[in-house]
Amino acid sequence: MVVNYFERGQAQLRWGDRADNALAEFVRSGKGLVVYHFSLAAFTGWADYEKMSGGNWRAGNGHHSARHDFTVDIKDTDHPITNGLKTPLPVQNEELYANLKWQPEGTYHVLATAYDDHSRYDEKASDARNKQPMSGPGINEPILWTTEFGQGRVFITALGHDADTTAETTFKVTFTRGTEWAATGKVTLPVPPELSK
């Protein structure tokens, strides 16, 4: 199952307890879930969703600089999703999510990161950019990660802002491999030559 949803903080767009419990039980029972891009901002206050997500865009946590080209560095080359991928991977004109609210260390597994260059932020820009404290010149931020929830597998990607970014090879390859892993625990999809080690 793929979650690509954000209820915009509007109570009438929340799923409700029945749907929440059904999703949590679906994953807990051993099924797979993919949490996609701004779905990290969905369902504030739903503890199980936040555990499944590992990191979330919440009040005071979550921002990005202006869209730009960057690279994604593979941190776990042995995981089925990232095995065989070269590093770094190119990403074009994308949002680089930073300063998410994270669950306790050890409850999520980082597959890949990207460097959030703090010099790219504009203090006059929108609240998505620079209204949260930052220190130092920059920091490596998780971009792809996994969690376990009960017996289930969850793949999370912060990539894929729009149609142009989802058409790029790095997104397509990591998203499809992550989805296969979440569904089956294995990855059989080949790595295309342009992203191969």
Image (cartoon, rainbow, N blue to C red):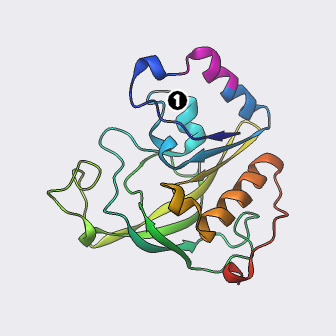
Would you identify the image quadrant in which residue 148 lies?
top right
> Where residue 12 sits in the image (x, y, percent)?
44, 17
Residue at the spot x=41%, y=57% of the render?
A: 97
> Where residue 50 sits in the image (x, y, percent)?
52, 37
In the displayed structure, 18 sits above or below 196; it is: above
Q: Amino acid at mark 1?
A: Ala
Mark 1 lies on residue: 47
Image quadrant holding the C terminus, namely bottom right
In the displayed structure, 195 sits above or below 37; it is: below
> Where residue 116 sits in the image (x, y, percent)?
37, 68
Taking depth in this image into account, of 10 and 86 the one nearest to the observer is 10
Taking depth in this image into account, of 12 and 121 the one nearest to the observer is 12
Residue at the spot x=19%, y=56% of the render?
A: 125
Residue at the spot x=79%, y=46% of the render?
A: 183
Q: Classify mark 1: helix, strand or loop.
A: helix
> Where residue 85 sits in the image (x, y, percent)?
69, 76
In the displayed structure, 126 sits above or below 13; it is: below
Q: Residue furthest left?
A: 124
Q: Residues within 10 Å of mark 1 (few under 14, many from 20)?
A: few
Residue at the spot x=72%, y=63% of the render?
A: 81
Q: Is residue 101 magenta?
A: no
The magenta segment: 15-22
Q: Main secondary structure of the magenta part?
A: helix
Q: Is residue 18 magenta?
A: yes
